[in-house]
Image (cartoon, rainbow, N blue to C red):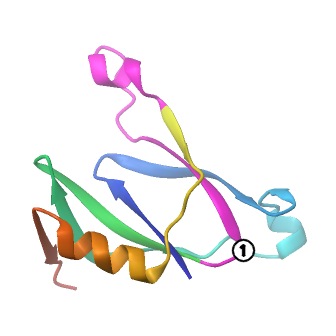
Amino acid sequence: MKYFFLSEGWTIGRVWEFGGLWNEAAWRRKPEIQQTNLCIIENSEKLWLYRVEDEVIMVEVKRIDSDSSKPEARSIGQVVLKRLIDADQAIEMLGKSEAFFKAET
């Protein structure tokens, strides 16, 4: 498994595997991407930990709030995460964060 942190207010867009963009017809399924119940606080911002299957190599993320009147919405519309982390790196980031919590499920 691979992991990444995603700020609240962002969502997942396109997904890439080794052959290019994830092809649901070829794979016969969507990629396995799951938000965990772990969150860290960095610079007063909540970052949720996501888990993805090993076949995923890149993930595009974009703002949920597309209100173009907000300066931050105009400055960053989408980002491609090219460096997903492993479990040890995720644990290290949880340990070094300002704060973290586990959401009740």
Residue 24 locus on image (x, y percent): 80, 66
Write the residue at 66% across / 71% down: 31
Identify which residue, 84 or 61, lies in the foreground. Answer: 84
Residue type at tag 1: Glu
Q: In this view, does 12 lie to the left or right of 5?
A: right
Quadrant for the N terminus in the image: bottom right
Residue 80 locus on image (x, y percent): 57, 44
Quadrant for the C terminus in the image: bottom left
Residue 94 locus on image (x, y percent): 24, 73
In this rendering, the answer to whether 34 lies above or below 44 is: below
Q: In this view, does 46 lie to the left or right of 31?
A: left
For label 1, count other residues whose C-alpha is less than 10 Å away and answer few (under 14), some (14-19) or many (20+): some
Q: Is residue 82 magenta?
A: no
* Number of numbered tags placed on the structure image: 1
Q: Which residues, given as a range, are shown in magenta?
A: 53-77
Write the residue at 87% across / 61% down: 19
Identify which residue, 90 or 47, lies in the foreground. Answer: 90
Task: Name which quarter of the figure residue 20 lies in.
Answer: bottom right
Identify which residue, 63 or 92, lies in the foreground. Answer: 92
Write the residue at 10% across / 48% down: 44
Q: Is residue 97 left or right of residue 18?
A: left
In this rendering, the answer to whether 82 lies above or below 105 is: above
Provide the secondary structure element on which disc 1 rests: loop
Q: Is residue 63 magenta?
A: yes
Residue 100 locus on image (x, y percent): 14, 71
Q: Name the residue under label 1.
A: 55
In this rendering, the answer to whether 42 lies above or below 17 is: above
